[in-house]
Image (tube, rainbow, N blue to C red):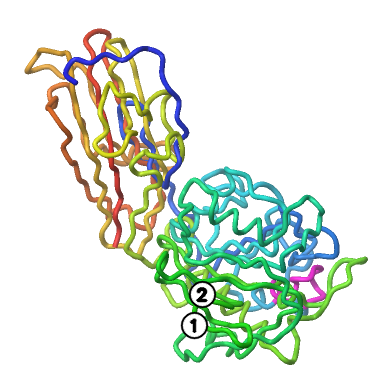
């Protein structure tokens, strides 16, 4: 409404979304460049921060963490590294095309840690046994949506190795259904609450599939030794595909190994940890050698899937810092603000459902300034734009109303900017002011194609003078790439 004035008290809403920060009156993109790495180097992070060594499990590539090379810098056999996943790790290391690390603390995305997900192409979750925190789930889902590869390995229902009331089935289903990025069946499958005692699930016939027929060999069968399957839901995600099925099953039920995509990233699921167990590990653990089981081809399946997730077959990694492939998608999280104060980083009260300013759609919007006193509001979100994308179109709807009467002086301004990871402004896309006041919303659009392959921060910054309010109201944002 024209000349509306806000109470100085602000409502705080959690910002959940993907990649765009709007803080105050200016839109700011923070660009975090993808760490440079050789085109042939795929960066893989194995998680060990969620009780992966609890009970009789030993799901690590090495006891040296985060860097397995500290145990043996040139491993030639699985016993050169200690852990039930050492065969997996050593096989990748011996190719010379992989850089491997182990995470021992909370998973993050966009932080400064050496094991931050933005530094990797693939994240392996080998039967996690504690729930991921809200922040971790946002990090994982954003990582995948921005081009990362996610390898989820479950076990049978009831495999609660640390007796905390949660097993891998529940933990991974929680990741997919209870996160701030997309909880509407983002990958197109759900994990079944089953305990299948034994079997040799068979691969489908698809000679062109890179997971079944990859550089590490041909997959014919896998192994179930107390495991589970997934139910596929292609209506939710048409990219979901079952590759290995429990005997007697096909189509949308009984998939023991499945793949999918999400945003610009890739996802793989395996229904049992026994196939990745190489029978070695730390003293005191009784392990089973599923990796070398003669009735299956588990090693080829694990290694081909890792390569596919990391982006093998493209010009580089699949990566969390901006992948080299491009899937047509909308990258911003909570792009219409209807999830409230999530995903976005914003000044207090900016994301609001206040009736004093109408949203364009729904109930929530981002309302910067409008106080009639000296105020700076910001709204921002970090986003990774895959390098394979030739189109990256940022758009948002903006409504400006003001109590200013001048027709020549910009007293109050809203800047829309792109920033890098150091906070340096790479570009000011536009500056709006009280002179742009008008009824209703107007769509504004900009090309960000020049930032493909980078992680940037989109930032809105609103600056208001000491008298006479100006409100900058943003709604229905989008960053569409193809």
Residue 89 among those drawn in magenta: yes
Image quadrant containing the C terminus:
bottom left
Q: Main secondary structure of the magenta part?
A: helix
Residue segment shown in magenta: 78-90
Q: Secondary structure at mark 2?
A: helix
Which sits in the foreground, 415 or 262? 262
- Identify residue for label 2: 308
List x then y, in percent, for residue 42: 54, 68
Q: CA distance from mark 2 to mark 1?
A: 7 Å
55 is higher (above) or lower (below) than 13: below
Q: SS class of the residue under badge 1?
A: loop
Please tell me in which quadrant of the rendered image residue 367 appears: top left
Tag 1 residue: 210
Q: Could you tell me which residue is drawn at 35 percent across and 29 percent down?
A: 353
Relative placement, left or right, of 195 versus 121 is right
Label 1 crowding class (10 Å Cα cut-off): few <14, some 14-19, many 20+?
Answer: some
- The spot of residue 293 in percent (x, y) is 75, 87
Residue 210: give x, y in percent of width and height: 49, 82
Is 254 located above or below residue 405 in the figure? Answer: below
Q: Nearer the viewer, residue 421 or 6?
A: 6
- Residue found at the very far right of the displayed protein: 284
Q: Would residue 24 be found to the left or right of residue 245 on screen?
A: left
Q: How many C-alpha atoms fall within 10 Å of the one at disc 2: few (<14), some, or many (≥20)?
A: many
The verdict on residue 2 being magenta is no
Q: Are marks 2 and 1 in contact (CB under 8 Å)?
A: yes
Left or right relative to 206: residue 327: left
Residue at 57% x, 43% y: name it.
135
């Amino acid at each position: 409404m024209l000349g509306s004035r806000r109470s100085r008290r602000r409502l705080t809403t959690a910002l959940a979304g993907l990649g765009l920060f709007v803080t105050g009156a200016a839109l700011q993109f923070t660009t975090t460049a993808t760490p440079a790495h050789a085109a042939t180097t795929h960066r893989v992070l194995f998680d060990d921060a969620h009780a992966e060594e609890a009970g009789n499990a030993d799901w690590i590539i090495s006891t040296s963490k985060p860097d397995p090379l500290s145990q043996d810098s040139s491993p030639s056999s699985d016993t050169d590294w200690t852990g039930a996943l050492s065969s997996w790790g050593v096989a990748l290391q011996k190719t010379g095309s992989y850089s491997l690390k182990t995470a021992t603390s909370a998973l993050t995305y966009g932080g400064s840690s050496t094991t931050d997900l933005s530094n990797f192409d693939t994240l392996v979750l080998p039967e996690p046994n504690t729930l991921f925190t809200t922040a971790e789930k946002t990090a994982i889902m954003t990582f995948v949506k921005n081009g990362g590869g996610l390898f989820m390995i479950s076990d049978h229902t009831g495999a609660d190795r640390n007796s905390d009331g949660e097993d891998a089935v529940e933990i991974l289903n929680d990741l997919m259904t209870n996160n701030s990025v997309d909880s509407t069946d983002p990958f197109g499958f759900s994990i079944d609450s089953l305990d299948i005692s034994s079997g040799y699930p068979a691969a489908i016939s698809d000679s062109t599939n890179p997971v079944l027929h990859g550089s590490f060999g041909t997959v014919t069968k896998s192994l179930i030794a107390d495991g589970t399957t997934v139910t596929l839901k292609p209506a939710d995600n048409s990219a979901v595909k079952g590759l290995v099925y429990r005997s007697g099953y096909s189509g949308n039920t009984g998939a023991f190994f499945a793949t999918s995509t999400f945003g610009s990233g890739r996802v793989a699921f395996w229904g049992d940890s026994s196939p990745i167990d190489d029978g070695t590990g730390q003293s005191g653990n009784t392990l089973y050698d599923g990796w070398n089981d003669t009735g299956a081809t588990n090693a080829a399946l694990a290694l081909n899937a890792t390569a596919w997730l990391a982006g093998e077959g493209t010009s580089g990694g699949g990566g969390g810092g901006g992948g080299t492939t491009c899937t047509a998608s909308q990258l911003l999280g909570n792009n219409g603000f209807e999830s409230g104060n999530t995903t976005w980083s914003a000044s207090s009260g900016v994301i609001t459902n206040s009736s004093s300013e109408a949203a364009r759609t729904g109930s929530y919007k981002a309302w910067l300034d409008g106080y009639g006193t000296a105020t700076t509001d910001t709204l921002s979100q970090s986003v990774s734009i895959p390098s394979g994308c030739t189109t990256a179109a940022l758009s948002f709807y903006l409504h400006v109303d003001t109590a200013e009467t001048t027709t020549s002086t910009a007293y109050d301004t809203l800047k829309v900017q792109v920033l890098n990871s150091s906070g340096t402004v790479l570009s000011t896309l536009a500056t709006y002011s009280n002179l742009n006041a008008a009824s209703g919303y107007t769509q504004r659009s900009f090309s960000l194609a020049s930032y493909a392959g980078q992680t940037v921060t989109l930032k809105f910054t609103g600056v208001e003078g000491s008298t006479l309010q100006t409100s900058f109201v943003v709604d229905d944002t989008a960053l569409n790439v193809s």
